[in-house]
Image (cartoon, rainbow, N blue to C red):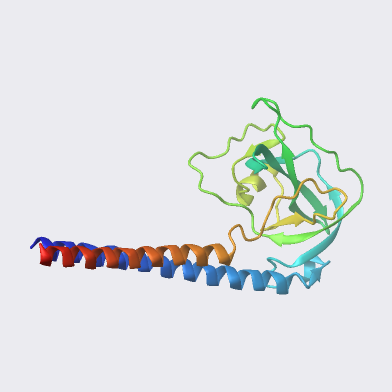
Amino acid sequence: MRSVAFIIFSIAVVALLLKLSWWQINRADEKQRLQSQIHHRQQTVITDLAQLPIEPLWHSITLEGEFDNQHPILLDNQLYRGRPGYHLYLPFMSQQQRVLVNIGWIAAPPYREILPTLPQLNGHQIIHGVIAPAQQLLQFKPDAADGQWPLRVQNIGLDWLTQQLQQPLLPWVIQISASSPIALIQTWQPVVMGPKKHYGYAMQWFLLAIAVVLLCLWWLRRERTA
């Protein structure tokens, strides 16, 4: 009876490990397709918001307009080389529309109640970047709306920010090009974990499944000879 229970338990564990391995393989394939899609779409540069493709994400974009320096947004909890900081987002007015632009990473002061000194990007600007989805992470407490700018937020919730700005925003953001003269430190990556890491994790789960099978066979052999 003990052997039967051990075999059933081992089969369940091996099945779970193989399922995790297969899930990682699927995730790797998804990341590979996404990387190919990003590379392909970035070959096309959009300059006219009136002629956006049906799926604008990951296309390169070049726009002329002006930044709204009165309404900066600081995306909290952004690390760079182990140092805490923010991603600075500014509304950009172009072709009678507004879009949030991620200017880049800026260091946080040593005390939480102090906000960093922000650059003032005045006058007519030409920006180059990539159309990207707004960052959305798990958040247990909604951001406070105290009416004071800059806003310090945990997520770039475009609907919520539209209410704070009282101006409509395009449903995506622009990640500014690192080569732009106004860009801050660039830490943003379109794919946080590449396919190679997923394949590595898949191999780890698969090897663990093999180890459990070998352990089960060794234990059964030991029980028979005991």
Judged left or right of residue 110, residue 197 is left
Judged left or right of residue 16, residue 21 is right
Which of the pair 88/107 is nearer the observer?
Answer: 107
Query: Is residue 55 among what the camera can see?
Result: no
Residue 72, above or below 38: above
Quarter of the rendering containing residue 145: top right
Query: Is residue 59 among what the camera can see?
Result: yes
Q: Quadrant of the C terminus?
A: bottom left
Judged left or right of residue 226, residue 179 is right
Residue 201 placed where, x, y %?
47, 62
Which of the pair 37/61 is nearer the observer?
Answer: 37
Judged left or right of residue 188, residue 49 is right
Which of the pair 93/19 is nearer the observer?
Answer: 19
Tell me which residue sits at (82%, 49%) in the image: 183
Residue 93 placed where, x, y %?
81, 52
Residue 153 placed where, x, y %?
62, 40
| Residue projecting furthest to the right | 123
Which of the pair 89/78 is nearer the observer?
Answer: 78
